[in-house]
Image: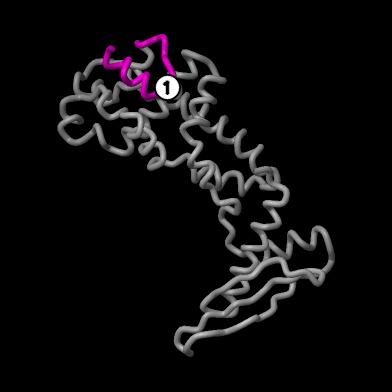
C-alpha cells in the first residue's frame, strides 16, 4: 500500500485523485523555500473551512432546536477551533504525511497545531472536491461525533437566573422563586443549597459557596432540564 494509501485508510474516506490529496498535504513553506510559484494547500483549506462550517451549522441547527443564533454560534465555535482541528489531524496521522520545506520540518512543523489544523481543513476540501458534499458530510460528522456529543446543552450561559426567568415568563407571568434549603459547614466554608420553584413545582436544586451561587446553580440545572424536554436525544 502506498504512503497516501495508508493515510486514506486511516481517513476511512478514499480520495480517487491522489494529486488532490497531495496538494492538501503541501505546506506553504515549500513555496517560500524554493522561491518559485509552488501550489500549496491554502486554497483547499479555505474551501474545507467553508464545508466544515456548513455541515456543523446544519447539525447544530437540527440538534438544538431551541437555540438562538448566539447560542448556535457559541456551540459551533467550541467545535471549530485550532486545537480541536489539530487533535483530529493528529488522530488520523496527518503529521507524518505532510509535505514541508526542510526548514519547517526541522523546526517541528509536523506536530505544530496550526499546521495540522490547516492541513485537516485542506483535506476536507479535497474530500469535498473529489467525492462531493455528502461524503464530506459523513466524514465530518464521524470525526466530530465525540465533540458534538460532549457539547454543553447550554453554551455561554452568563446569567442563568435571568435566562430562566425569561424562558419561564414566555410561558407564564409567574416569576421563578428561590428557596434556601440548607446552609452547612463552618462559617469560613459554608455550603448553601436551594431550590428553584415555579407555579408550586420544584424545578431543580443547586449548591454553592454563597446563597447567590446556589441560586445560580439551581437556575442552570433548571434550564438544562427544561431544554432537554424539547431537545431530541
Residue neighbourhood size for the residue with mark 1, other residues' Cα within 10 Å, grouped as few (<14), some (14–19), many (≥20): few
Front position in the image: 55 or 139: 139
Residue 30, image x and y in percent?
Answer: 24, 22
Residue 177, image x and y in percent?
Answer: 74, 74
Residue 204 versus residue 189 in the image, above or below: above
Which residue is depicted at the point 53% across and 25% down?
A: 138
Q: Which residue is situated farthest in the right direction here?
A: 173
Q: Which residues are magenta?
A: 1-18
**Figure quadrant of the C terminus:** top right
Front position in the image: 230 or 106: 230
> Is 175 colored magenta in this rendering?
no
Horizontally, residue 12 falls left or right of residue 205, namely left
Which residue is depicted at the point 38% across and 42% down?
A: 83
Front position in the image: 53 or 79: 79
Residue 46, image x and y in percent?
Answer: 45, 27
Q: Secondary structure at mark 1?
A: loop
Residue 88 versus residue 1 in the image, above or below: below
Residue 131, image x and y in percent?
Answer: 50, 14
Residue topped by disc 1: 12
Amino acid at each position: 500500500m502506498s504512503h497516501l494509501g495508508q493515510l486514506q485508510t486511516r481517513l476511512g474516506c478514499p480520495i480517487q485523485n491522489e494529486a488532490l490529496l497531495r496538494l492538501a498535504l503541501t505546506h506553504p513553506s515549500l513555496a517560500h523555500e524554493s522561491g518559485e510559484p509552488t501550489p500549496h494547500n491554502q486554497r483547499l483549506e479555505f474551501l474545507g473551512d467553508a464545508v466544515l462550517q456548513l455541515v456543523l451549522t446544519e447539525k447544530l441547527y437540527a440538534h438544538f432546536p431551541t437555540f438562538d443564533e448566539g447560542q448556535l454560534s457559541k456551540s459551533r465555535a467550541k467545535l471549530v477551533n485550532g486545537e480541536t482541528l489539530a487533535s483530529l489531524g493528529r488522530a488520523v496521522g496527518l503529521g507524518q504525511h505532510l509535505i514541508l520545506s526542510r526548514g519547517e520540518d526541522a523546526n517541528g512543523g509536523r506536530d505544530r497545531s496550526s499546521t495540522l489544523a490547516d492541513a485537516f481543513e485542506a483535506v476536507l476540501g479535497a474530500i469535498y472536491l473529489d467525492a462531493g458534499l455528502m461524503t464530506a458530510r459523513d466524514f465530518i460528522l464521524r470525526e466530530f461525533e465525540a465533540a458534538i456529543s460532549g457539547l454543553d446543552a447550554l453554551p455561554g450561559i452568563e446569567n442563568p437566573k435571568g435566562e430562566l426567568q425569561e424562558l419561564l415568563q414566555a410561558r407564564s407571568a409567574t416569576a421563578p422563586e428561590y428557596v434556601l434549603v440548607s446552609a452547612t459547614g463552618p462559617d469560613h466554608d459554608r455550603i448553601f443549597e436551594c431550590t428553584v420553584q415555579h407555579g408550586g413545582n420544584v424545578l431543580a436544586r443547586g449548591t454553592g459557596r454563597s446563597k447567590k451561587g446556589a441560586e445560580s446553580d439551581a437556575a442552570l440545572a433548571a434550564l438544562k432540564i427544561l431544554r432537554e424536554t424539547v431537545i431530541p436525544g
